[in-house]
Image: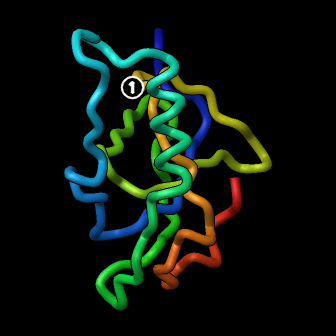
Amino acid sequence: SIGMQGTLYHYYLTDYTFPKHELERFFPPGSPYPTDETIKDLMDEFETCMVIDDRGDRSRFVEDVYASRGQVGINPAGSVHQSFSSKEGGAMLFVLWSGCHCNIKLSNVKHKLGTELLREV
C-alpha cells in the first residue's frame, strides 16, 4: 500500500498564505501546460521576489507534526512552511505535486516571530 512511513514535521507560518494575485503566472499562448523550462524560470523568480512581510503579533512560525504513518498532509497553495524529518528517523512518503515550489531566502523573511526555527535551504 502507498502511505506515509515515519514522521514528517514542519514549521509553518500561522494565519498566512501568499495572496493569489502574487502567485498567478501566465504561460506561453497555445501551451496547454507549463513546460519544464517555464516551471524552472518561475521557481527562480519566486526565490528572489517572494518576501514575507512582518505580520506583527497576528502570526508566527510554529513547529508541528505534519504527518505520520498512515496520515495524509495537504499544503494549501500559497502556504508558507518548511518540512523535515527527525535526525533519529527519516520519512518516506508518496507525493502528488505540481512540480513548482519556492525556497524563500531567509533574508526575504521580514516576519520575526518564530524565525529562529527556520533553516536556510
Q: In which quarter of the image is residue 51?
A: bottom left
Q: Residue at x 30, y 66 (%)?
A: 16
Q: What residue type is labelled 1?
A: Ser
65 or 112: nearer the viewer: 112
Q: Residue at x 40, y 77 (%)?
A: 53
Query: Residue placed farthest to the bottom in the image?
Result: 57
- Percent x, y for residue 40? 53, 29
Left or right: residue 42 versus residue 59 is right
- Percent x, y for residue 47? 54, 51
Q: Residue at x 55, y 42 (%)?
A: 44
Q: Does the image show residue 53?
A: yes
- Percent x, y for residue 118? 63, 67
Query: Residue placed farthest to the front in the image?
Result: 29
Q: Does the image show residue 9?
A: no
The image shows residue 95, relative to residue 87, as above or below, that is above
The image shows residue 50, relative to residue 117, as above or below, that is above
Left or right: residue 96 versus residue 109 is left
Residue labelled with disc 1 = 98
28 or 115: nearer the viewer: 28
- Percent x, y for residue 99? 46, 25
SS at circle 1: loop
